[in-house]
Amino acid sequence: FSRRGASVSGYPIGSMHADAVSVINANAPWLAARQPSRAVDYGCVPGACIGKGRFQPVVLYRSPGETVWHSAITTLWLGDGMLFHFFDAGNPEVLVKVLDGCGHNGYWWVFGSAGTDLDYWVAIRDLADPDVESWTRLEDWPIQYRSVGGTITSASGWSGEGVINDVQALRCSP
């Protein structure tokens, strides 16, 4: 896929990540039709938020022996999910997605997976929360997961090994 000049349905593959949604819409209309509409505008820049545009994820990482966290870069946005990379855009490291489980159990669901052995930290800001502007530190954000040595823990007490599968991440509004 990295050959210069190659294309998929007229889209240059070299810029495919920037046009991923267009490629999906052109080649998989059944998938495009399943994408939820944005009923509410939470003021997030398109491509920067997931979960119907309501949640803003941030991923940080640190190399072995470091105490400083570094910001990961968004590699690919797909509506309810994002891929992040640490060093090279061609090597995604972490997937984060937020799904609306409100109709099933009354909660927003967070899923995530990493293809790295580095420590990472996922923080997700809920733009619908009236106190969102007061969250000046990532530690204040309501949804957080930290992976240190392969064990993932959250501020709410959720923990797991290797993947995030929190189906009670944030209670839905009444």
Image: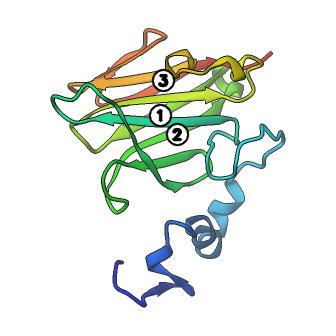
> Could you say where residue 118 lies in the image, as x and y percent from the top left?
23, 36
How would you rate the neighbour count of disc 3 (Cα within 10 Å): few for under 14, some for 14-19, many for 20 or more?
some
Q: Which residue is mark 2?
A: 97
Residue located 34% across and 85% down the image:
3
Q: Is residue 103 above or below residue 4?
A: above
Judge by depth and name the residue closer to the eye, 171 or 141: 141
On-image quarter of the C terminus: top right
> Could you say where residue 125 lies in the image, as x and y percent from the top left?
61, 28
Q: Which residue is mark 1?
A: 111
Labels 3 & 1 near each other (Cβ < 8 A): yes
**Label drawn at residue 166:** 3
Q: Is residue 150 above or below residue 158?
A: below
* Nearest to N terminus: mark 2 or mark 1: 2
Labels 2 & 1 near each other (Cβ < 8 A): yes
**Label drawn at residue 87:** none
Amino acid type for the residue under numbered disc 2: Lys
Residue located 66% across and 25% down the image:
104
> Could you say where residue 166 lies in the image, as x and y percent from the top left?
48, 23
Residue located 37% across and 60% down the image:
89
In the orientation shown, which residue stands out farthest toward the bottom? 5
Judge by depth and name the residue closer to the eye, 93 or 136: 136
How would you rate the neighbour count of disc 1 (Cα within 10 Å): few for under 14, some for 14-19, many for 20 or more?
some
Q: Is residue 151 left or right of residue 73?
A: left
* Nearest to N terminus: mark 3 or mark 1: 1
Q: Is residue 73 above or below residue 11?
A: above
**Element at badge 1?**
strand
Toward which corner of the image does residue 54 lie, by quadrant? top right
Amino acid type for the residue under numbered disc 1: Phe
Amino acid type for the residue under numbered disc 3: Asp
> Could you say where residue 68 lies in the image, as x and y percent from the top left?
30, 29
How would you rate the neighbour count of disc 2 (Cα within 10 Å): few for under 14, some for 14-19, many for 20 or more?
many
